[in-house]
Amino acid sequence: MDREQDAFGRLLRDHAEGDAGSEILERDDGLVTVAPRPELYFAEREQWSPREQTAIERADGRVLDVGCGAGRVGHALDAETVGIDVSPGAVAVARERGVDARELDVADATRLDGTFDTVVMFGNGFGLVGTRERAPRVLDALAQVTTDDARVLADTRDPHATDDPVHRDYHDLNRRRGRLPGALRVRSRYETTHTPWFDLLTVSPTEMRELLAPSTWELREVIERNERGNYVAELRKSR
C-alpha cells in the first residue's frame, strides 16, 4: 500500500503515540460508520472477545498472523509468530512492539520462508480472502505455507444475522451484481487520508463451506458464535 494512502497505519501510529482520533469506514453504497476504537488493535489477550480467547488456545507451533495490525496476536503468544499486513504503518508499529511483522498480502504468503502450524485470522480476518474469485488463490497460498496437520483460526461474521434494512438492501445489491451477499467493498478514512477501495468478505458457515469446497481446507468447527453472528471457524486440511 502507498504510504500516502495508509489511513489505518496512521491511526495505529497516532494511537501508539497517545493521540488517535477515530477511523471511519465507508462502504460503496454510501454507508459511513465509525470503526471500533484503536485500542482494539492493541488489546491484551484477556481483553479479546470470548471467541478469540477460546480459539487462541488452539494455536500451537509456528504461527502466521494474517492481517496482524499492531501485532496483538504476536505480542500475546510465546510461540514463534510472523505477522503480515498490507499496511506499512501497521507493520512498523507491530515491529516496534517486538513482533516479527512483514508488509505482505495474504495472497502472496508463499513468499514467506518455512512452514506454519497455525494461521490466525482474527478481527474479521477471514474477510481478507476478498471475493469469491480471489478466495481460491488465498486458500491455496495458505495451504502451501502450512504443515499437513495445520489449522486456520478464522474470525468472520454471518451477514444474514441482521434485520437492519440498510444491510439487507446491500445484500440484495450484491446479489444483483453477482457477488455473495456478505461481500463488502470499503475504504478506511482517518483525518485527511483514505485507503484505496478494497474487498472484504463475510460469510455464513454454509457459505464458507461452499468457498472451501474446491480447496484443501474444510470447516471442522464453529467456535463461540454470538448473537450478532460473529464466530471463529477452525479449518483443517481435508487431503
Image: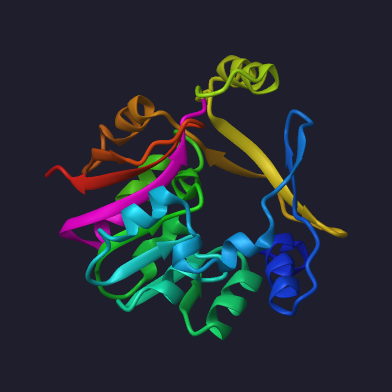
Q: Main secondary structure of the magenta part?
A: strand
Does residue 162 show up? yes
Placement of the C terminus among the 4 image quadrants: top left
- 62 vs 71, left or right, is left
Q: Residue furthest front?
A: 46
Does residue 134 show up? no
Residue drawn at the location 45% of the way across and 54% of the way down: 122
Residue drawn at the location 36% of the way across and 66% of the way down: 64
Percent coordinates x, y for residue 25 in the rendering: 73, 45
Placement of the N terminus among the 4 image quadrants: bottom right
- 217 vs 195, left or right, is left
Q: Nearer the viewer, residue 59 or 88?
A: 59
Rendered image quadrant of residue 163 = top right
Percent coordinates x, y for residue 2 in the rendering: 70, 65
Q: Is residue 170 covered in magenta?
A: no
Q: Which residues are magenta?
A: 141-159
Percent coordinates x, y for residue 132 in the rendering: 45, 33
Q: Residue furthest right?
A: 192
Residue drawn at the location 20% of the way across and 47% of the way down: 236
Percent coordinates x, y for residue 57 in the rendering: 28, 60
Q: Nearer the viewer, residue 27 or 54?
A: 54
